[in-house]
Image: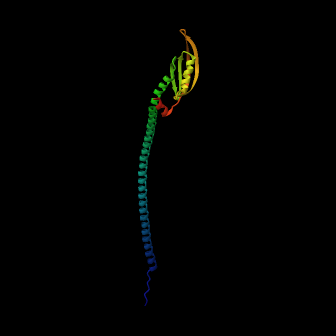
C-alpha cells in the first residue's frame, strides 16, 4: 500500500520559507545598517580630516598675511629711509653750493653797494640792498649776468632817497641760480 502523507507539508514548507525569508531579510537589513554605519563613520572621518586641513591652511594663511604686512611695513620703512638718504645726499651735494653762492655774490658785488637781505626760493634769489647810485645797481646786474652761477637778473624796485645829505638807492632784484657744472666749479677753485 502506498504511503500517503497527510501532514500539511505545504504549510510547513511555507512556514520554513517564511522563517528563511525573515532571517535573510534581517541579515540583509543588518548588513545594510552595517554598511551605512561604516560609510557614515568613513565620511565623518574624511570630513574631520578635511576640516583639520582647512584649519591648518587658515592658520598658515594668517601667518603669511602677518608676514606680508611685516614685509610691507619694512618696504615702506625702507622707502622712507631711501627718501631720507636721497634728501641727505642732495643736501650734502648742495652744501658747497651755498658757500659758492655767497662767494660768487661777493665777487659780483661792486663797491658802493650794500646788501640788506637775501631770500632763496628753489633756484631763485631775491636780493635787497642799498647803493650809492643807480649806475652801481646796473653794474651789479651786469656782473650777475656775467657770472656762471647766476642768470636773468630782473630789477623789481629801485627807490632813491636822501639820508643825512647822502643820496641812496634802495633796490630789490631777483636772479635765477644755475649750476655751472663741475668744469666751471673746478676753474673757479
Report the side of 96 relative to 167 (left or right).
Answer: left
Kindly identify the residue that appears in the image at 42 percent across and 47 percent down: 64
Q: Is residue 81 left or right of residue 137?
A: left
| 149 lies above or below 47 | above
Give the vertical position of 115 relative to 176 (above or below).
Answer: above
Placement of 134 over or under 164, stated as above or below: below
Q: Position of residue 104 (x, y in %)?
A: 49, 25
Q: Residue at x 58, y 14 (%)?
A: 160
The location of residue 63, given as percent across then percent down, is: 41, 46
Please identify the residue farthest to the top as the structure is shown: 165
**Residue 16 in sight here:** yes
Q: How is the image coloured?
A: rainbow
Outermost residue to the front: 187
Q: Nearer the viewer, residue 56 or 19?
A: 56
Q: Position of residue 97 (x, y in %)?
A: 47, 29
Q: Residue at x 42, y 45 (%)?
A: 67
Looking at the image, is 153 positioned above or below residue 70?
above
Choose top left, top right, bottom left or bottom right for residue 26. bottom left
Q: Is 161 left, or right, of 106 in this rendering?
A: right
Asked whether residue 171 is in view, the answer is no
Q: Quadrant of residue 133?
A: top right
Q: Quarter of the image for the N terminus: give it.
A: bottom left
Judge by depth and name the residue closer to the eye, 159 or 44.
Answer: 159
Count of numbered circles in the view = 0
Quarter occupied by the C terminus: top left
**Residue 89 in the image: x percent, y percent?**
44, 34
Amino acid at each position: 500500500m502506498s504511503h500517503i502523507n497527510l501532514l500539511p507539508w505545504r504549510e510547513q514548507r511555507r512556514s520554513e520559507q517564511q522563517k528563511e525569508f525573515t532571517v535573510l531579510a534581517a541579515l540583509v537589513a543588518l548588513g545594510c545598517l552595517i554598511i551605512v554605519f561604516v560609510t557614515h563613520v568613513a565620511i565623518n572621518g574624511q570630513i574631520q580630516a578635511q576640516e583639520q586641513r582647512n584649519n591648518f591652511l587658515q592658520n598658515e594663511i594668517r601667518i603669511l598675511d602677518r608676514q606680508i604686512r611685516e614685509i610691507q611695513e619694512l618696504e615702506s620703512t625702507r622707502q622712507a629711509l631711501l627718501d631720507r638718504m636721497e634728501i641727505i645726499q642732495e643736501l650734502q651735494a648742495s652744501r658747497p653750493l651755498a658757500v659758492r653762492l655767497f662767494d660768487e655774490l661777493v665777487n659780483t658785488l661792486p663797491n658802493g653797494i650794500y646788501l640788506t637781505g637775501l631770500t632763496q626760493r628753489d633756484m631763485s634769489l631775491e636780493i635787497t640792498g642799498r647803493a650809492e647810485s643807480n649806475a652801481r645797481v646796473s653794474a651789479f646786474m651786469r656782473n650777475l649776468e656775467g657770472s656762471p652761477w647766476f642768470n636773468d637778473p630782473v630789477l623789481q624796485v629801485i627807490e632813491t632817497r636822501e639820508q643825512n645829505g647822502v643820496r641812496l638807492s634802495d633796490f630789490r632784484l631777483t636772479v635765477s641760480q644755475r649750476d655751472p657744472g663741475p668744469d666751471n666749479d673746478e676753474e673757479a677753485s
